[in-house]
Structure formats: C-alpha cells, structure tokens
Amino acid sequence: MKNEHAVAALAALAQDSRLAIFRMLVQAGLEGVSAGGIRESLGMAPATLSFHLKELVHAGLVKSTQEGKFVFYRAQFDQMNALIAYLLEHCCEGHPEGCGMDGLECKPEQAKSRRTVTDRA
C-alpha cells in the first residue's frame, strides 16, 4: 500500500460516523448492509449517510452494489488488511511474528443468506 492510500483510508476513518459505518460493515461480512439498514441502525439522515458513504467509497474501504431497488454496501477486506499490514510493516524491527502479529488479517467466509427483512429496507 502506498503512503497516500493509507492517509486517505485513515482520514476517512477518522470521523465518528464513518468509523461506525465501517465497523458495522466489517461485522456484517461479505453480505453487506443495505443503505436503509445502515441508516436505520445508526439513526442518520439520508443525506448525511450518503456523504459519509461517499467518503468511505472514495477511500477504497467500502464498495456499493445495486441489487434490485436497493444499494448494498460492503467493507473491502483486502483494503482493510492492506492498511493493517502497512501499519504493522515494521513492527518489532521488521519481525512482526515476534509481536504475535504474524498473519493478522480478516477473511470473512461467504455466508448463506443471513439477511433479515430490515436489511432489505
């Protein structure tokens, strides 16, 4: 990961609402969450949510997909793991295995369908 990509990702996460959105999407895994589901869970106005999602998408941390009349957002785990690796790159003098950080990455499994009725809103 290049320095400018790390700065953009960290800047996007350095705001309470965007961090909450990103953490929700990480928790949701590969299924993602609909824009309505995020709005409902976090109690955000649609315009505010749209602004924050745009910033996360621009930073490469989130991706949106249109599914019928709904837009689903998903965390980009490869980008998240690249950011973590970038931050830990020189941990323990370049030997992260000595810090217990070796292999630190998140790889959610593809779930069958766990979406609820509220996720589709």
Image: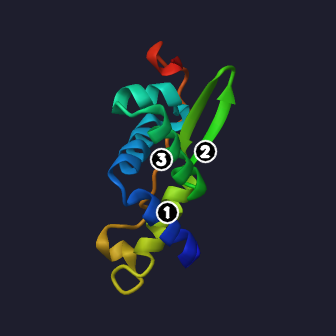
Element assignment for label 3: helix
How crowded pointer 2 is (Cα within 10 Å; few <14, some 14-19, many 20+) is rated as some
Instruction: Out of 49 and 83, give the one closest to the viewer.
Output: 49
- Residue at x 51%, y 70% (from the top left corner): 6
Looking at the picture, which amino acid does disc 3 mark?
His
Write down the residue under mark 2: 63
Separation of disc 3 and disc 1 at Cα?
13 Å
Q: Which mark is residue 52?
A: 3
Using the numbered discs, state the Cα–Cα distance from disc 3 to disc 2 in whole angstroms: 13 Å
What is the x, y in percent for residue 2?
58, 76
Q: Residues within 10 Å of mark 1 (few under 14, many from 20)?
A: many
Q: Residues within 10 Å of mark 3 (few under 14, many from 20)?
A: some
Residue 76 seen in the current view: no
Q: Is 23 placed above or below 68 here?
A: below
Mark 3 or mark 2: which comes first in sequence? 3
Which circle's residue, 3 or 1, is located before the other in the chain? 1
Q: Is residue 117 visible?
A: yes
Q: Which mark is residue 97?
A: none
Which residue position is annotated with label 1? 9
Q: Mark 1 falls on what kind of element? A: helix
Residue 106 position within the rendered picture, expressed as x and y whole percent measured from the top left: 46, 51
Residue 91 % position (x, y): 36, 79
> Which is nearer the eye, 26 or 101?
26
Q: Is residue 20 above or below residue 92?
A: above
